[in-house]
Image: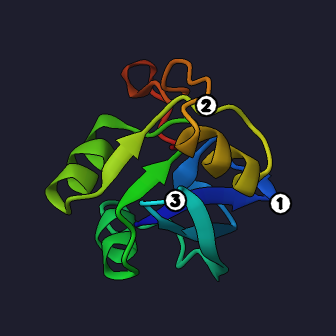
């Protein structure tokens, strides 16, 4: 499996659509070990583009602080699992915490119902 984490300044970006890059981790599902890591520059925020682009990169799950409901739906249409509410931190630590079942997730930090379209 390949996990993607939106990154800005080397840490999980609160708003996935405006991140600087994506940290992508290849994981051996049998052992739960990270077998590869690559940083890919974000192609930029274009409404509806990132879910399909990340799926083309082989991503099977995205771990993010938050995203709008339209993006969640587009990821699901592209067969990419969405894990929301992740705390800010080092991308590798977040993936390892998720794999071990120790990732504490909170609420989706993006709330488009109140007019915040930054996600």
Give the SS element for disc 2: loop
In primary-sequence order, the first of circles 1 and 2 is: 1
Quadrant of the rendered image containing residue 69: top left
Residue behind mark 2:
103
Residue 23 visible to an observer of this rendering:
no
In this view, 22 is above or below 53: above
Nearer to us of marks 3 and 2 is 3
In this view, 65 is above or below 62: above
In this view, 53 is above or below 15: below
Residue behind mark 1:
10
- Please state if 72 lies on the left or on the right of 95 as rendered: left
In primary-sequence order, the first of circles 3 and 2 is: 3
Q: Residue at x 61, y 31 (%)?
A: 103
Quadrant of the rendered image containing residue 46: bottom left
In primary-sequence order, the first of circles 1 and 3 is: 1
Nearer to us of marks 1 and 2 is 2
User: Are dots 1 and 2 in contact, CB under 8 Å?
Assistant: no
* Alpha-carbon span between mark 1 and mark 3: 26 Å
* Alpha-carbon span between mark 1 and mark 2: 18 Å
Residue behind mark 3:
31
Residue 43 visible to an observer of this rendering:
yes
């Amino acid at each position: 499996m390949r996990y993607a984490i939106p990154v800005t300044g080397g840490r999980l970006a609160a708003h996935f659509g405006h991140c600087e890059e994506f940290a992508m981790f290849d994981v051996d599902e049998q052992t739960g070990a990270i077998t590869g890591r690559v940083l890919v520059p974000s192609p930029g925020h274009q409404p509806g583009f990132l879910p399909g682009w990340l799926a083309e990169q082989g991503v099977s799950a995205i771990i993010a602080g938050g995203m709008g409901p339209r993006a969640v739906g587009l990821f699901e249409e592209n067969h990419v699992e969405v894990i929301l509410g992740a705390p800010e931190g080092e991308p590798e630590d977040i993936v390892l915490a998720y794999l071990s079942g120790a990732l504490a997730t909170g609420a989706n930090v993006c709330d488009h119902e109140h007019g915040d379209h930054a996600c």
